């Protein structure tokens, strides 16, 4: 198991590092205001992508006919229709979005980026079939080569432009290469057909994910939208940089753990086996979240100082707070994977709905003159509330005992507290404290150690179908 996870994590981490490097290079090439404009374009794209998410990976991984070629070709039809609808929506909304960010003269840029949903609609979905059988090589290639190509494109782009257009065209190159790579690594020919029955089934499966996508857009980007709308593009650039530095590692972890743990949970037919897998899943997320907090807190300051430069020095106070927020979300993501393993697709939606109820409070705070750290404090309260609800759901509905999670959760909270309350302390003191806390966390994680170091751990090669619940 550790070998599979190491392969996934290293691949996704490399892809995230490339994207982070691209962001850093772009931030050095353009002004804060132009970086804010580029961020507003990415926010618009993320909104459409999340609002139209149908969960093709989950459908193929968990469906009983996930290996069927006809099923894949019908899903290609669904994906293409989704892309056309998303592109049309983004194109029509472009004037409103440009006006909201105070750049009405750049409506054309918001319209141009609407080509991305079309590109995504033409992707080959065979990579998810390979993931279903724990073959991750194709997924890693798709994760690595497109961002690498967009990074290489920065050189000619920087010679042609000196503003936000560098960021705009880098995103377009990335998405185009992603679609091409999905066809290059596929082991089946691309077939397209429109099957009304499959479309209905896909929508029935995906509508909770679409609703969750709308909520997730607010979860991931709600504070950024508030900052950009109320505080301006330069504040948006600073806040987005801080969010990216903390969100990137958390997304790497959650993407990797989804591919690793979901097939195993779905394959657990016996109740006792499922409970053991569920506990291991949550414990793994706890230790990964704690490790992420330590890494960002110990390395983030030096990264900002030596790589980003004085222009982004204002993000330093936000890094620790945002990392704590993302750590809570990583653990909550583990609960969502456990729920999805038994077909409960609405669980993440419910917890995220609770999370976004804190957004009006953040907006009100900004209007009253609150600083960016106060916005992050409010976001942390929302994530903590969502995590509590997710754990209670897992215990009461899925009958997963929480006793074995108590000590790991306490240790993780101690890690977060140490990170927040020791800001400004010498690096050696902070590192020693993190080391002791992580050592204590390792001592209370016997299930993770057992499955990590035991040979021949079950892989769950034949996931059962997710039932509608």
Image (cartoon, helix red, strand yellow):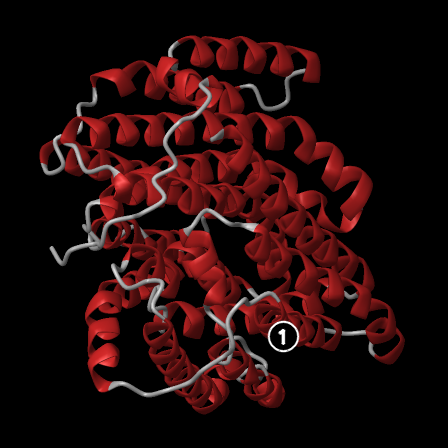
Q: Quadrant of residue 210?
A: bottom left
Characterize the local packing of mark 1: few (<14), some (14-19) or many (20 or more) Cα atoms within 10 angstroms: some
Q: Which of the two residues, 159 or 304, is positioned nearer the viewer here?
A: 159
Percent x, y of residue 341: 25, 45
Q: Is residue 264 left or right of residue 134?
A: left
Percent x, y of residue 366: 43, 55
Whether residue 62 is visible, yes or no, is yes
Q: Is residue 78 left or right of residue 32?
A: left
Q: Which of the two residues, 5 or 235, is positioned nearer the viewer here?
A: 5
Whether residue 366 is visible, yes or no, is no
Q: Quadrant of the C terminus?
A: bottom left
139 vs 76: above or below:
above
Q: Is residue 444 left or right of residue 156?
A: left
Which element is circle 1 on? helix
Q: Which residue is mark 1?
A: 180
Residue at 63% from the left image edge and 70% from the top image edge: 184
Percent x, y of residue 427: 69, 18
Residue at 40% from the left image edge and 46% from the top image edge: 258
């Amino acid at each position: 198991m550790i070998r599979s996870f190491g392969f996934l994590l290293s691949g996704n981490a490399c892809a995230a590092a490339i994207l982070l490097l691209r962001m850093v290079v772009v931030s050095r090439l353009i002004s804060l205001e132009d970086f804010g404009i580029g961020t507003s374009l990415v926010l618009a794209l993320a909104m459409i992508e999340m609002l139209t998410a149908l969960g093709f990976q989950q459908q193929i991984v968990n469906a009983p006919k996930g290996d069927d070629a006809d099923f894949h070709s019908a899903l290609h039809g669904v994906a293409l229709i989704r892309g056309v609808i998303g592109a049309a929506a983004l194109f029509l909304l472009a004037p409103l979005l440009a006006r909201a960010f105070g750049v009405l003269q750049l409506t054309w840029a918001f319209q141009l980026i609407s080509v991305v949903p079309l590109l995504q609609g033409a992707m080959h979905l065979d990579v998810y079939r390979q993931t279903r059988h724990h073959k991750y090589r194709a997924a890693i290639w798709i994760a690595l080569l497109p961002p690498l190509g967009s990074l290489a494109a920065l050189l000619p782009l920087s010679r042609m432009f000196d503003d936000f257009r560098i960021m705009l065209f880098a995103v377009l190159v990335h998405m185009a290469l992603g679609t091409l790579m999905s066809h290059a690594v596929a082991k089946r020919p691309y077939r397209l057909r429109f099957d009304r029955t499959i479309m209905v089934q896909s929508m029935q499966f995906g509508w909770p994910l679409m609703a969750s996508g709308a909520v997730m857009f607010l979860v991931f980007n709600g504070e950024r939208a508030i900052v950009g709308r109320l505080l301006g593009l330069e504040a948006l650039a600073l806040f987005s940089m801080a969010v990216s530095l903390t969100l990137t590692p958390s997304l790497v972890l959650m993407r990797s753990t989804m591919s690793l743990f979901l097939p195993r949970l779905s394959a657990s037919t016996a109740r006792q086996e499922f409970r053991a897998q569920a506990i291991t899943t949550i414990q793994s997320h706890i230790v990964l979240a704690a490790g992420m907090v330590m890494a960002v807190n110990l390395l983030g300051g030096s990264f900002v100082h030596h790589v980003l430069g004085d222009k982004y020095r204002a993000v330093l106070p936000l890094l620790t707070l945002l990392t704590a927020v993302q750590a809570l979300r990583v653990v909550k993501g583990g609960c969502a994977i456990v729920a999805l393993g038994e077909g409960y697709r609405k669980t993440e939606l419910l917890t995220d709905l609770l999370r976004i109820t804190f957004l009006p409070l953040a907006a009100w705070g900004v209007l009253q003159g609150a600083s960016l750290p106060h916005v992050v404090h409010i976001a942390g309260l929302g994530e903590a509330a969502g995590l509590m609800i997710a754990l209670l759901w897992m215990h009461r509905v899925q009958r997963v005992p929480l006793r074995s999670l108590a000590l790991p959760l306490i240790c993780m909270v101690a890690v977060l507290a140490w990170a927040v309350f020791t800001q400004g302390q010498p690096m050696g003191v902070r590192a020693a404290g993190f080391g002791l806390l992580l050592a204590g966390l390792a001592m209370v994680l016997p299930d993770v150690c057992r499955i990590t170091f035991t040979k021949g751990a079950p892989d769950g090669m034949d996931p059962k179908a997710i039932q509608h619940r």
